[in-house]
Image (tube, helix red, strand yellow):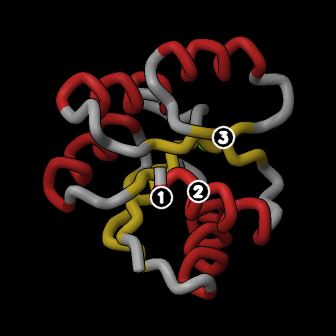
Amino acid sequence: MANILIVDDSRTSRKILRGILESAGFTIVAEATNGVEGYDKYVEFRPDIVTMDITMPVLDGLGGLKKIKETYPESKVVMVTAAGQKNKMVEAIQAGADDFIPKPFDSEELVATLKRVIDE
Ligand SMILES: [Mg+2]
């Protein structure tokens, strides 16, 4: 099935995401811990879809999203959001985010969202 790049500065979040996605049959091709590394891994692996955390050091998820979308408009990037990030979500939509997955993760909803975006 699809190849996924996980971008999140939290080791725990990456581990949970990886578990859910691998159980659903996805392949995690790489992980990154900030927007810069996320962009570099995107270029290297060209995954089918990216899960992008918003709050990260060095370059946050909005910065990472913009970098990827500027170079690869056909990329698919789903933002991982926490409560109280409405403004950032608006900015992410404007920057081309394909969808959102809320923390804490709901396995079924998360998998359904990624499948929908991949099939778009
Ligand atoms: Mg974070």
Residue 102 in the image, given as x and y percentages of width and height: 76, 46
Report which residue position mark 1 lands on: 119
Considering the image in quadrants, where does the N terminus appear? bottom left
User: Looking at the image, which residue is at 62% across and 80% down?
Assistant: 19
Label 3 Cα neighbours within 10 Å, binned few <14 / some 14-19 / many ≥20: many
Which secondary structure, mark 1? helix
Q: Residue 11 carries which label?
A: none
Measure the C-alpha gap from mark 1 to mark 3: 16 Å
Measure the C-alpha gap from mark 2 to mark 1: 5 Å
Vertical relation: 10 (above or below) 98: below
Q: Tell me whether circle 3 and circle 2 mark residues in contact (CB < 8 Å).
A: no
| Front tag of 3 and 2 | 2
Tell me the quarter of the picture where residue 84 sits.
top right
| Mark before the other along the chain sequence, 1 or 3 | 3
* Quadrant observed for ligand 1 in the rendered image: top right
| Front tag of 1 and 3 | 1
| Left or right placement of residue 1 versus residue 97 in this view | left
Report which residue position mark 2 lands on: 116
User: Looking at the image, which residue is at 43% across and 51% down?
Assistant: 50
Residue 100 in the image, given as x and y percentages of width and height: 66, 40
Q: Which amino acid does label 3 sit on?
A: Phe
| Left or right placement of residue 6 versus residue 10 in this view | left
Residue 85 in the image, given as x and y percentages of width and height: 75, 23
Q: Tell me whether circle 1 and circle 3 mark residues in contact (CB < 8 Å).
A: no
Measure the C-alpha gap from mark 3 to mark 2: 12 Å
Vertical relation: 77 (above or below) 1: above
Label 2 Cα neighbours within 10 Å, binned few <14 / some 14-19 / many ≥20: few
Which secondary structure, mark 2? helix
Report which residue position mark 3 lands on: 100
* Nearer-the-camera pick, 116 or 40: 116
Q: Tell me whether circle 2 and circle 1 mark residues in contact (CB < 8 Å).
A: yes
* Nearer-the-camera pick, 78 or 44: 78
